[in-house]
Amino acid sequence: MAFQPIIDVGRGLVFAHEALVRGMDGSGAASVLSFVDPDNRYAFDQQCRVHAIELAASLFPRKDIPHLSINFMPKAIYEPRACIRQTLETAKRTNFPLDRIIFEFKEVEKLDTAHLINILRSYREIGFKTAIDDFGAGHSGLNLLTRFQPDIVKLDMDLIRGIDLDPVKQVVVRRTLEMLKDLGITVVCEGVETAEEFTTLTELGVDLIQGYFVARPTFEGLSEVSSAIWRFLGNGKTDEDTAL
């Protein structure tokens, strides 16, 4: 696993770290996922969850624990409460609080909506937070939101790329933020790579931001958010303050 932080620009702290699958040599997710098929999907999904929680429990600070965001495969889950047992056992064994775990799925994958909603509702009842990743790029989108409102929506990076130079994207993102706020959903803007994108998003009222401009993923460890980010936000944090 590698971890990449999501920062809360309003509060000047790390909101969460997303667990990103990597090969044993640090290779990217695509190289690993190319080996995943229907026969090993369930075991792979379970192994990723367990390792992410175990690693986070060993790396995260004991005080003011940030959230842990874990990507899951809805097609790997045949029955939510049966398939969550190993996750719950791992969280209990490592003393990792359930309410600090976010389960996110990618909207780009075509899914059985009824099955997906059953998973999300079950996870919420257990105490997890839920999130849609790559919102705006996939199949479910607005139709899913009419039937289930997750805790978090992560806007697709294609909406963010070059937003400082694109008035149309600014309008789309502004209206999307307003809609999600009305629904009580927290928004994360991911894929932020430049100071100009970062500035535009903060001016639009975005609080949670993820991307290379904030910090790159760190293999089997936590990334340090650049002190330049905190100075940019004007809260005067030092390198020591940001080292988690």
Image: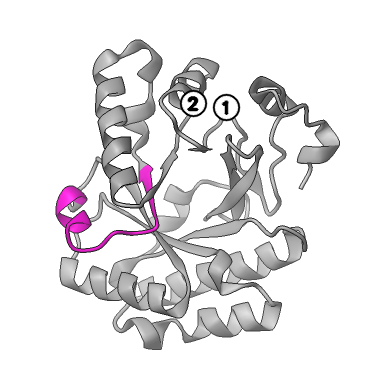
Report the residue at 45% width, 33% height from top: 206
Pointer 1 residue: 213
The quadrant where residue 201 appears: top left
| Amino acid carrying mark 2 in the image | Thr
Task: Report the side of 115 relative to 213 (left or right).
Answer: left
Q: Residue 222's mark?
A: none
Q: Residue at x 56, y 73 (%)?
A: 98
| Residue 126 x/y as whole percent | 44, 79
Disc 1 marks a residue whose amino acid type is Phe
Q: Is residue 107 above or below residue 175?
A: below
Question: Does residue 209 sit above or below 101 in this rendering?
Answer: above
Q: Give the percent coordinates (x, y) of residue 3.
A: 61, 50
Q: Nearer the viewer, mark 2 or mark 1?
A: 2
Q: CA distance from mark 2 to mark 1?
A: 13 Å
Left or right of 64: which side holds 26? left
Tell me if residue 76 comes above or below residue 84 in the rendering.
above
Q: Furthest residue to the front?
A: 182
From the image, tell me which residue sits under label 2: 202
As drawn, the residue found furthest toward the left would be: 143
Residue 191 visible in the snapshot: yes
Q: Secondary structure at mark 1?
A: loop
Judge whether residue 150 is colored magenta: yes
Residue drawn at x 27%, y 36% is 176
- In the rendered image, which quarter contains the N terminus? bottom right
Res 103 → quadrant:
bottom left
Q: Can the viewer see residue 38 in this picture?
A: no
Segment colored magenta: 141-154
Q: Quadrant of residue 96?
A: bottom right
Instruction: Compare marks 2 and 1 and give the one earlier in the sequence.
Output: 2
Q: Residue at x 26, y 41 (%)?
A: 179
Above or below for 242 versus 88: above
Label 1: few (<14), some (14–19) or many (≥20) C-alpha neighbours in 10 Å:
some
